[in-house]
Amino acid sequence: TRPWLQGARLTVWELLQENIPVKLAVEGAAGHNMKTHKVDWVIVGSDRIAANGDVANKIGTYNLAILAKHHGAKVMVAAPTNTIDRQCENGELIPIEERGAEEISHWQGKAVAAANCPIVNPAFDVTPASLIDAIVTERGIIENPNAEKIAAHFEQE
């Protein structure tokens, strides 16, 4: 999670605090690791969930979901219900923030990319509900999410 490396700095620390086994790897190794190690679940968070179950999260989440499906792993989204935007019909309606070019063209203040190289730097991507096996909230589990199941999740007492 560039540029702040939250995975290395925060997520790993949290897992270690709870004695949950964890290994840190670079993002680009996800496919290789799924191919060579038995991965049962990919668990991600969410910044926003549309009413149909599409999930907006940090960039790379969509890639992980595609890799998971290819390798037979399931995808779980862990998020509080206040992340679900029932007014947003689907993920295509979620605006994607473009971050500053220097986040990827520079390292520690020094240019690492050619000065005339165009930069594309989305901070988030949208994973379609069709790639998600479960959304887990404080209210329970929504398996194979869709608009009807999301709505029913809020009808439960």
Image (cartoon, rainbow, N blue to C red):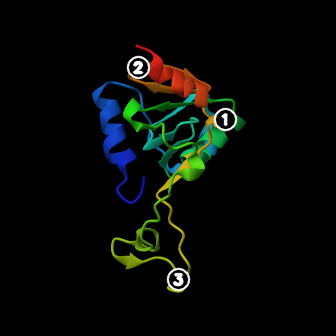
Q: Nearer the viewer, residue 45 or 156?
A: 156
Asked which secondary structure carries label 1, the reply is helix
User: Can residue 39 be seen here?
Assistant: no
Foreground mark, 2 or 3, reads: 2
User: Can residue 54 be seen here?
Assistant: yes
Could you say which disc has been placed on residue 130 in the image?
Answer: 1
Q: Earlier in the sequence, mark 3 or mark 1?
A: 3
Kindly indicate whether the residue at mark 3 contacts the one at mark 2 (C-beta within 8 angstroms): no
Q: CA distance from mark 2 to mark 1?
A: 21 Å
- Tag 3: amino acid: Ala
Dot 2 alpha-carbon crowd within 10 angstroms: few under 14, some 14 to 19, many 20 or more: few
Q: Dot 3 corresponds to which residue?
A: 114
Dot 3 alpha-carbon crowd within 10 angstroms: few under 14, some 14 to 19, many 20 or more: few
Q: Residue furthest top?
A: 157
100 horizontally vs 32: left or right: left
Q: Earlier in the sequence, mark 2 or mark 1?
A: 1
Q: Nearer the viewer, residue 31 or 122?
A: 122
On-image quarter of the C terminus: top left
| Residue at screen point 54% across, 69% down | 120
Q: Would you place residue 147 above or below residue 94 in this image?
A: above
Give the percent coordinates (x, y) of residue 150: 53, 27
Give the percent coordinates (x, y) of residue 135: 51, 28
| Residue at screen point 35% across, 31% down | 15
